[in-house]
Image (cartoon, rainbow, N blue to C red):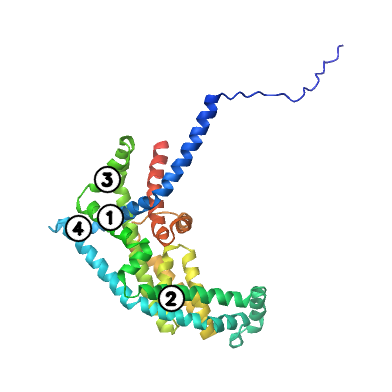
Amino acid sequence: QERPKTTKPKGPQKVLVELSMVSVAKAALIILAFYFLLQFVNEIGKVIVIVFVAILFSAAIDHTVNYLERKKIPRPISVLGIYLVLLFIVGFFISNLIPIVAEQLLELAKQADNMVKDFMEGKGLEDIPFSDKITPYLQNALHGIDEQTVISQLEGALEKVANQLQGIAGNTWGAIKVVFSSVFNAVIVFVLTFFLVADKGSIDRFIMALLPSRHSKYVVEKSEAIKDKVGHWLRGMITLMFLMFVLYLIGFSILGIKYATTLAIMGGIAELFPVIGPIMAGIPVALIAFNQSPWLILWVIGLIIFVQQIEGNVLIPLVMRKATGLSPIIVIISVLIGYELLGILGIVLATPVAATISIFIADYMSKDK
């Protein structure tokens, strides 16, 4: 009986890859083209942002302009009327509310030293039941935190924001400059928005001119859905932020919380951040309440829970029922990316951009099925 033949293991094989000069040149050209494309996008990035902001504003006011048009009011007159109302509201807000907030922030910066020290040392906890059990946990949690670093950073941040607010207090154009980086950009946004809304159908024609014909028709078909979703979100978010500000202001004032106006504004702005927003806004409230009276923290927690219940069960179903429908985690990621790219303006644009992208993704997924 013959033994099966054994084959010796072969050594490592060499694979020769031939690259022609044409292939190398093509790869180099692709890399070079991609590099120049990135440079081009970087250079015109501001223009893209301005155009998108104008489209966002036009989507927000288009519904109102359509309603006024049905009442026989010409579209250009309606847009100018909306501009005047918005400028009046912004001017009133800047003239009356911002000085109060700036003053409260400066006062808070002066008190930051004592507030942080009292909190780190757990002063006032002796008035709370089971304080002997709570104090060790608090001290253990705060162990290793440099008190002076916290104080200096907190004071610096508060004073910086307060000084910026004082600089724009009573100056509507100053506030606009903070948001849009310059008055010129703001004027361009308002002018673009005017022409996009005043001439019905101009948004669709603008998209047709901006994109290649094979893509523009599809985008125009989806533009109505985009305008509806973005417009509902923006109007709903502004309404929700204002209502939350009012609820917090009433609640903090009743409880006697110091700096109630500033904290209420923070609570309203926090609505831009789902889930984590109320937590972020609640931390300074808890710190201030603790320094007034440790017992007050319990009332503050109860108030925040009560307001959140009103928001979740009443306000969101009423105000945001036609909003984006995005997952909170998607919104949070979008807001963080937007802030990294464009700062405050990026926070405002993040959710509408995500909502717009979601429309195309949903359409692609439905066609794929």
Residue 193: name its quadrant.
bottom left
Q: Which mark is residue 183?
A: none
Q: CA gap, disc 4 to disc 1?
A: 14 Å
N-term mark: 3 or 1: 1
| Res 316 seen here | no
Query: Are the residues tagged 3 and 1 within 8 Å (C-beta)?
Result: no
Tag 3: amino acid: Phe
Numbered label tally: 4
Q: CA gap, disc 4 to disc 2?
A: 40 Å
Q: CA gap, disc 3 to disc 2?
A: 41 Å
Please tell me whether mark 3 sits on a helix, a strand or a loop.
helix
Please tell me whether mark 2 sits on a helix, a strand or a loop.
helix
Tag 2: amino acid: Ala
Name the residue tied to disc 2: 162
Q: CA gap, disc 4 to disc 3?
A: 23 Å
Instruction: Report whether 155 appears left or right of 100.
Output: right
Please tell me whether mark 1 sits on a helix, a strand or a loop.
helix
N-term mark: 1 or 2: 1
Q: Residues within 10 Å of mark 1 (few under 14, many from 20)?
A: many
Name the residue tied to disc 3: 206
Q: CA gap, disc 1 to disc 2?
A: 32 Å
Q: CA gap, disc 3 to disc 1?
A: 13 Å
Tag 4: amino acid: Tyr
Which residue is rendered at x = 61% and y = 87% of the image?
126
Residue 208: name its quadrant.
top left
Extreme-right residue of the structure? 1
Name the residue tied to disc 4: 67
The quadrant in which the C terminus is found is: top left
Q: Which mark is residue 58?
A: 1
Which residue is rendered at x = 35% and y = 65% of the image?
177
| Res 147 seen here | yes
